[in-house]
Image (cartoon, rainbow, N blue to C red):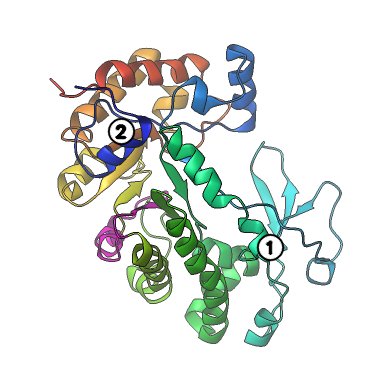
Amino acid sequence: MTTMSPRERLITALNRKEPDRVPIDLGFTPPLYEVFRSKTGCDSPEEYFDLEPRHAGIKRTRLQTDFSPWLGELPKGAWVNEWGEAELPCSFYHFTDYVHPLAKAQTAKDIRDYPWPDILADYRWEGFGDRVRDLHEKGYPVCAGMAHLFEQAWHQRGLENFLCDMAQRPEMAETLLDIVNEMRVEYSRRAAEAGADVLSLADDVGTQRAMMMSPAMFRRWIKPGHAEAIAAARSVKPDMHVFYHSDGDIRAIIEDLIEIGITVLNPVQPECMDPAWVKAEYGDRLAFWGTMGTQTTMPFGTVDEVRRVVKERIETVGRGGGLVLAPTHVLEPEVPWENVVTFVEAAREYGRYPLP
């Protein structure tokens, strides 16, 4: 088979057809990234491992909003993002605690009057299309999108508060979701307009055992917002792929995701969803991005086990196309460097089409 460009390879896989080889993806926590740098002398995992996906985002905000009226006094070392969420350093690397700026909001007006970020300001989009074109010229596919809806809402209110809003204070929940989703919808439209290949959406709505909320509540509160963002993108670029991330067991809503136009499911966490079953059940309508366990195989498997699981995923989920092989999240510090290298080498060895 003729060697494909990274963009051709990824898009072919997402179209559920067989490319020249299985595309792969990787992400590191900060400590493992430092191991990567020390082992390779390189700053870019994408370049060193020849990963297919690339990402384009907007510029940083120029706003210097004072969120102290919503956050109060913060401990030393805390930092505040453009949404006004204060992140507090914890003992374990990239995990943080939050101070939720709208935790004390009492009315929908309190939410409307909050100083929201300027995601859609023209200056933040300067050069976005140029970055997409530059990556395309280099042969890479581009993923873009303002991912979260449910998560962004509960980051503002706090998880318990927002779940109670959905159950008992619908005006509060509707107001917050509408404000966040208005930005997401326009972001999605602009990403499509710039020519991005994949719209990236996400919301962790699953736990290791089941959904975080009932499927009915997901359909009432979260599904319509994602549907609106997808429709906005597809109104500009009808063939745009839509990637949806949720950790955990979300089997109860996979049909809902397909219904609103999701074409790529991530990460298919093997600790709670069998990737081979998901492929058999939905592989005629979905592609899959992930499937390599970051709670099991990658940190705790031997080199031989990593090779075995890579081969198994390719032979089951990858057969016929439709697989971007990747760990199901960023790799944690416990992952041995040898397992990272083995993952890439095994994917290259076993992932060439046509499969045996």
Residue at coordinates 35% horizontally, 72% vertically from top-left?
219
Q: Is residue 159 left or right of residue 66?
A: left
Front residue (pair 53, 27): 53
Secondary structure beneath disc 2? helix
Front residue (pair 131, 82): 131
- The percent position of residue 189, horizontal first and vertical second, equals 45, 64
**Residue 254 visible in the current orientation:** yes
- The residue under label 1 is which amino acid type? Trp
Q: Between tags 1 and 2, which lies in front?
A: 2
Residue at coordinates 66% horizontally, 79% vertically from top-left?
111
What's the magenta region?
238-261
Residue beneath disc 2: 9
Check whether the beta carbons of the residues at disc 1 and disc 2 lie within 8 A of each other. no
How packed is label 2: few (under 14 Cα within 10 Å), some, or many (20 or more)? many
- The percent position of residue 38, horizontal first and vertical second, equals 64, 14
Q: Is residue 265 left or right of residue 35?
A: left
Front residue (pair 92, 16): 16
Front residue (pair 11, 148): 11
Is residue 247 shown in magenta? yes
Residue at coordinates 29% horizontally, 28% vertically from top-left?
22
Q: Looking at the image, is mark 1 or mark 2 earlier in the sequence?
A: 2
How packed is label 1: few (under 14 Cα within 10 Å), some, or many (20 or more)? some
- The percent position of residue 42, horizontal first and vertical second, equals 60, 18
Using the image, determine if residue 3 lies above or below residue 281. Answer: above
Residue beneath disc 1: 83
